[in-house]
Structure formats: C-alpha cells, structure tokens
Image: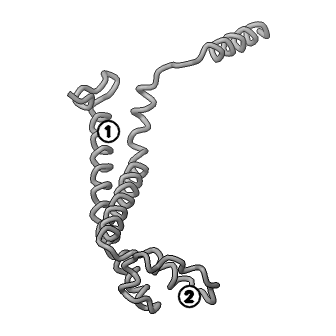
Amino acid sequence: MSKAFYPPDTMSPTDIRNVADVRRSIWTGGFTGLAFGLPCGFIAHRGLFFVGKSMGVAVKDMRGGAENAGLFDEPVTSVKDFVRRSIRAAAPLSKNHRMMFVFGGGALMSYVGASAAGKNNRYKMEDVYERGKLDTLKLYEKMNEEKKEAAKQDLK
C-alpha cells in the first residue's frame, strides 16, 4: 500500500486534508495542461504549414527528402529566403512530425500546469514540513553549537 494511506502521527487531520488537496490540485493541473497542450501542438504544426505556404514553399518541399540536401550551399539573400529555406529543410509536415508536435505540446503543457498548481498551493504544505522536520545536524554543526554555548556560559 502507499504511504499516503498511512500518514505519520505528527500530522493532524487538517494536515492530511491539505496534503490531499495539494496532490489533487497538482494532478488536475497536469491534466488541464495536457488537455490544453495537445490541441496547441496540433495548431502549432498547422501554423508552421501555413507559414511555409505563405513564404512560397511548395507542399512537396515541406515533406522533406533527399532533394532538400544542400539548401544552404548558396548565400542567403534575405530573411524571407532564410525562413523559406529553413522550413523546407526542417520538413515539418510529415505525420511523424505532427505526432511529435502534438505529444510534445501535451507533455510541455502538462509539466507547466502541474508545476504551476504545485507552486500556487505550496503555502498549504509549510506547516506540514515544519512539524515533520527532524533535527539532522551534522557532527561539525553540533560541535560548533556546543562551542557557542560554552562561550556564552564563559561570558556569564
């Protein structure tokens, strides 16, 4: 079983509820980001297609292939020429690239959504962290504290 079902004794019922609420908001934020990112990836892929089309790149050139080798052998004359050659060289219109855009957009936005939800609900967890904290001083830290206490007692 998960440790979530057996919380430590230091947690009150309110703390347990807060931890569950934060976990729930992180999951819903991730799925919301995924639901937003999948169509955004598809729209980005289609947008790249229309940018290439408006720049005068033929659809067969945007599919990629060996005929696109050596696109940058000649000097680039303008920004429009550079963008046209880049889109033609990248070949962003195959089905595999579309799936990469869709899943990449979904994964990125899922991460962003979950991270934003976690950061927005971080304040609910501060009491839990403080209450469950253990005294884990290193040996040299304990020695420094003892020296400071001895010095304070010597001054008295």
**Residue visible at 39% across and 33% down?**
128
Instruction: Give the farthest residue toward the front.
Output: 66
Tag 2, which secondary structure? Answer: helix
**Residue visible at 74% across and 12% down?**
152
Amino acid found under the numbered disc labelled 2 = Asp
Tag 1, which secondary structure? Answer: helix
Circle on res. 81: 2
Amino acid found under the numbered disc labelled 1 = Val
Foreground: 136 or 1? 1
* Vertical relation: 139 (above or below) 131: above
Circle on res. 19: 1
Q: Please state the horizontal and vertical placement of residue 67, each as a whole percent of the image.
A: 44, 80
Foreground: 86 or 28? 86
Residue 133, quarter of picture: top left
Circle on res. 147: none
Q: Please state the horizontal and vertical placement of residue 100, each as a whole percent of the image.
A: 34, 65
Q: Few, some or many C-alpha atoms within 10 Å of disc 1 (few <14, some 14-19, many ≥20)? A: some
* Vertical relation: 110 (above or below) 24: below
**Residue visible at 45% across and 92% down?**
56
**Residue visible at 61% across and 89% down?**
78
Foreground: 70 or 18? 70
Q: Please state the horizontal and vertical placement of residue 83, each as a whole percent of the image.
A: 53, 83
Q: Few, some or many C-alpha atoms within 10 Å of disc 2 (few <14, some 14-19, many ≥20)? A: few
In space, the residues marked 1 and 2 are separated at their CA atoms by 55 Å
Q: Please state the horizontal and vertical placement of residue 4, each as a whole percent of the image.
A: 26, 32
Quarter of the image with the C terminus is top right
